[in-house]
Image (cartoon, rainbow, N blue to C red):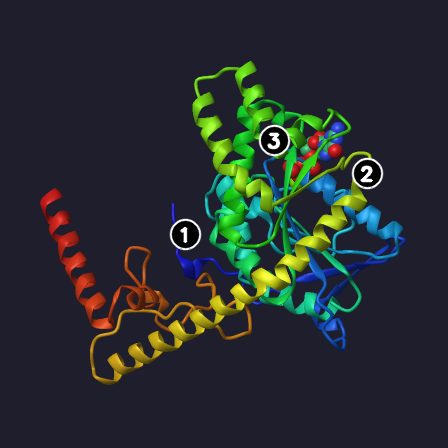
Amino acid sequence: MDIPQEKLSLGDVQIEEKTFSADSSLETSSVSSVEQEGTHNSPIVIILVGMAGSGKTTLTQRLTAHLLARKSAPYTVNLDPACREPPFPVNIDIRDTVDYKKVMKQYNLGPNGAIVTSLNLFATKFDQVLDILKQRSKTHKYILIDTPGQIEVFMWSASGNIITECLAALFPTVMIFVTDLVTNAKPITFISNMSYACSILYKTKLPLVITLNKCDQIDPTYAKEWIQDNEAFEAALASQPDYSSTLASSLALVLDDFYRHIQHTVVSAYDGYGMEDFFAAVDKAVTNYETEYKPMYEALVQERKTKSTKVKKKVTAARESGEPSCFSVRGSSDGGGAGLSLRLDDGDEDDSSSSDDEPNAAEANEEGTFNQLYQSMAKQRTAKSKEADTSN
Ligand SMILES: Nc1nc2c(ncn2[C@@H]2O[C@H](COP(=O)(O)OP(=O)(O)O)[C@@H](O)[C@H]2O)c(=O)[nH]1
Ligand SMILES: [Mg+2]
C-alpha cells in the first residue's frame, strides 16, 4: 500500500544527537546546541550493509571499540528503527526520532512496511543529520552507519538511496558488504552473496569492501580461494552438485572480473580479528573514491542540476503561456546535497496534485518536451477512465 506523501511527515522534529568520548560516557544534546566548527576535514563514512544476521551491528560495535581503544572515537549512526538497544554508543539513533511501533499502528503496516516507512520518515530530516555530521567532521575520522537488518530495506529503497548519495556527495564514502563465512560455505550461497555484492557496487557506484565475517567460527581459507581462483570454486561446485550448478558456474566466470577490482577482508566481529586489515582496505577504498568515484559523482550532480534547471524553465514557460500545469518539479538541488530532493515532506507547491501513476516533469525532460509528456499523460488518463468505464 502506498502512503500518500503528504502524510509522511515528521513535522518540525529536531534530530537528537548524543555525544560520547573515549570513556563512552553519553550526553544528550540537540542540533541547535552544537557549535559550528571551523574547516571541513572530510571524515570517512563507512556504511555497513549485509544480509540479516551477517553481523553488521556486531561489527559496528567491534569497529567502535577498536577505534575508541586508539583514542579516535568514531561518530556512529544507527539507521535500524527496529533494533533492540545497539551494543555500541550511538551518536544519532533513528529510534530517537521515529517510533517504529507507532508507525506500524499509525499507517496500519506490518513490520517490514513499518521499517521502510520509518526510514522514509527519517530521510525527510536527513538534511539535519548532514548538518550535524559537517559540524562534527573536525573531531571524527570515521563515521559508522549501521543499517537495518534486512538488506533490501536500505539498498533498494528510495530513502536508502538518498541517504547514501547525500553522504557520498559530502564525504568520502565506502560501502562495506558484511557477509557471513558460515552460511557462505556452500558454493551456491557464496556465489549468490557475491552477486549481491556486485549489484551493490553497480547500484551505489561507491567503493566496496567485501567483509567476510565470523572467521572465529570457520576457517576462511575456502572463501579466499574461491575469490582468487575460479578453478578452486569450480572444484567445490563439482563436489556438491545442485540443480543450479551450471548457473553458479557461469556466474563465477562473470564475477571473476568483479573480484579483481574489489577488495575483500576477513574479520571476526566477535573477537576483533582483522581490524587492521579492515581499516587498510577502507583507506585504499577512499583513494578509489577520490580518484574514480568523486569525479563521477560531481559530473552526475552537475548533470542533475542542469536537468532540473531545464525542467523548471519549461514548467515556468508553460505556466506563463497559460497551459494547464499538473506537474511537480523533482530533482531540485537546493541545499548542496547530491542534487536530490525528497518528495515525502514539504514538497513543491504542486505536489498535492501529483500521484505515483502520473509522470512528473523530471521524467518529461527525459522523454522529450513538456508538451509531449502532457499529451501522453492526457492519453493515459483517457485510456484509464475508459478502462474504468468498461469494468463498471
Ligand atoms: N561467532 C560470531 N558470531 C557473530 C559475529 N558477528 C556477529 N555474530 C553473531 O551473529 C548474530 C547476528 O549479528 P548482528 O550483528 O545482529 O547481525 P546484523 O543483523 O547484520 O546486524 C548475533 O548473534 C551475533 O552475536 C562473529 O564475528 N562471530
Ligand atoms: Mg543489526
Quick check: marks 1 and 3 in contact, CB under 8 Å?
no
| Sequence order check, earlier mark of 2 and 3 | 3
Instruction: Single out the residue that lies furthest toward the bottom.
Output: 320
Image point (55%, 73%), residue name:
336
> Which residue corresponds to mark 3?
229
> Which residue corresponds to mark 1?
3
Amino acid type indicated by mark 3: Asp
Q: In which quarter of the image is residue 185?
A: top right
Q: Which of marks 1 and 3 is in front?
A: 3
Amino acid type indicated by mark 2: Gly
Badge 1: how crowded within 10 Å, few (<14), some, or many (20+)?
few
Q: Is residue 68 above or below residue 14?
A: above
**What whole-number distance in Å separates the C-alpha atoms at marks 2 and 1?**
43 Å
Q: Quadrant of residue 371?
A: bottom left
Question: Ligand 1 is located in which of the four quadrants?
Answer: top right
Amino acid type indicated by mark 1: Ile
Badge 2: how crowded within 10 Å, few (<14), some, or many (20+)?
some
Q: In which quarter of the image is the N terminus?
A: top left
Badge 2 marks a residue whose secondary structure is: loop
Which is nearer the eye, 266 or 19? 266
Does 268 sit left or right of 307 as displayed?
Answer: right
> Which residue corresponds to mark 2?
272
